Amino acid sequence: EAIKNLDNLKVTYSKLSELHCDKLHVDPENFRLLGDILIIVLAAHFTKDFTPACQATWQKLVGVVAHALAHKYH
């Protein structure tokens, strides 16, 4: 979903952000931690193909998704 709507992630994830903020009370730091874990798993699984450039791209993507998910907390 994020890749399809890179220009408007806050709107794309607004309902999910609201759910995590208002109903589930998830600490927004967990979004960043989950993104870090995802990157570690990808790097471990795709060792040769997971280049520094690929890692940087994934870090950017999970960072903006985590920020969009934390939007309702601000």
Image (cartoon, helix red, strand yellow):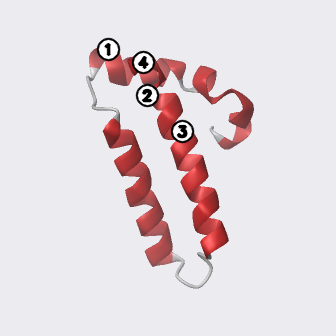
Q: Report the Cα–Cα distance between label 2 and label 1.
A: 11 Å
Which residue does the numbered mark 3 point to in the structure image? 65
Q: Are marks 2 and 4 in contact (CB under 8 Å)?
A: yes
> What label sits on residue 70 in the rendered view?
2
Which residue position holds label 4? 74
State which tag comes first along the sequence, 2 or 1: 1
Numbered label attached to residue 22: 1
Which residue is at a point 61% across and 73% down the rendered structure image? 52
Could you tell me the amino acid type at mark 3? Answer: Val
Q: Which of marks 3 and 2 is nearer the N terminus?
A: 3
Between the C-alphas of marks 4 and 1, the distance is 12 Å
The nearer-to-camera label among 2 and 4 is: 4
Tell me which residue sits at (53%, 30%) in the image: 68
Specify few, some or many for label 4: CA neighbours under 10 Å numbering under 14, 14-19, or 20 or more: few
Asked which secondary structure carries label 1, the reply is helix
> What amino acid type should be assigned to the residue bearing mark 2?
Ala
Please report whichever mark, 3 or 1, sits nearer to the chain's N-terminal start.
1
